[in-house]
Image (cartoon, grey):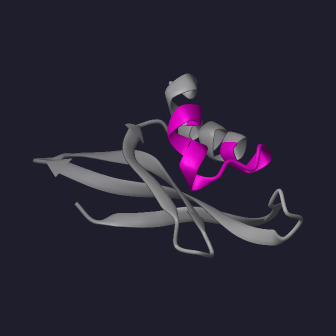
Amino acid sequence: MKMEEIASTRQSLKRENGTNFEVRYAIVAEKETAGRFECEHYGVKVETEFGEQALFRDVTTSRSRIEELYSLLHRNGVTPITTYDVLEDWL
């Protein structure tokens, strides 16, 4: 299955020492085909400008649910390090 990003946004966050850094949030999708049927699986990716990354594939098959999660991550300034904890609570 080929993964593609279908939405993304960036946000500038502030470190404890006062410096800014950028975080990028993305919805990723993969299509799975079985005979005549096709299903799309969605996940999220959170990455910083320093190369830190959290990627969670196959979180849901619901576009509206993954958009909820994507919005939650962005709205709360979640970083790659804390993405797993937020995802675990969200599920």
- Looking at the picture, does residue 65 appear above or below residue 36? above
Q: What stretch of residues is rendered in magenta?
A: 73-86
Residue 16 colored magenta?
no
Along the horizontal axis of the image, is 36 left or right of 89? left
Residue 66, position as x, y percentages in the image: 55, 41
Along the viewing direction, whichever of 5 and 36 lies nearer the viewer: 5
Magenta stretch: dominant SS?
helix
Q: Tell me the residue at 49%/62% (across/down).
A: 53
Q: Furthest-right residue in view? A: 18
Q: Tell me the residue at 54%/33% (across/down).
A: 85
Along the horizontal axis of the image, is 9 left or right of 4? right
Q: Tell me the residue at 75%/70% (across/down).
A: 21
Residue 19, position as x, y percentages in the image: 85, 70
Q: Quadrant of the N terminus?
A: bottom left
Along the horizontal axis of the image, is 24 left or right of 65? right
Along the horizontal axis of the image, is 61 left or right of 90? left
Residue 6, position as x, y percentages in the image: 52, 63
Residue 22, position as x, y percentages in the image: 72, 70
- Looking at the picture, does residue 88 appear above or below residue 69? above
Along the viewing direction, whichever of 74 and 39 lies nearer the viewer: 74
Q: Furthest-front residue in view? A: 17
Along the viewing direction, whichever of 25 and 5 lies nearer the viewer: 25
- Looking at the picture, does residue 20 appear above or below residue 65? below
Along the viewing direction, whichever of 72 and 68 lies nearer the viewer: 72
Q: Tell me the residue at 23%/51% (across/down).
A: 32
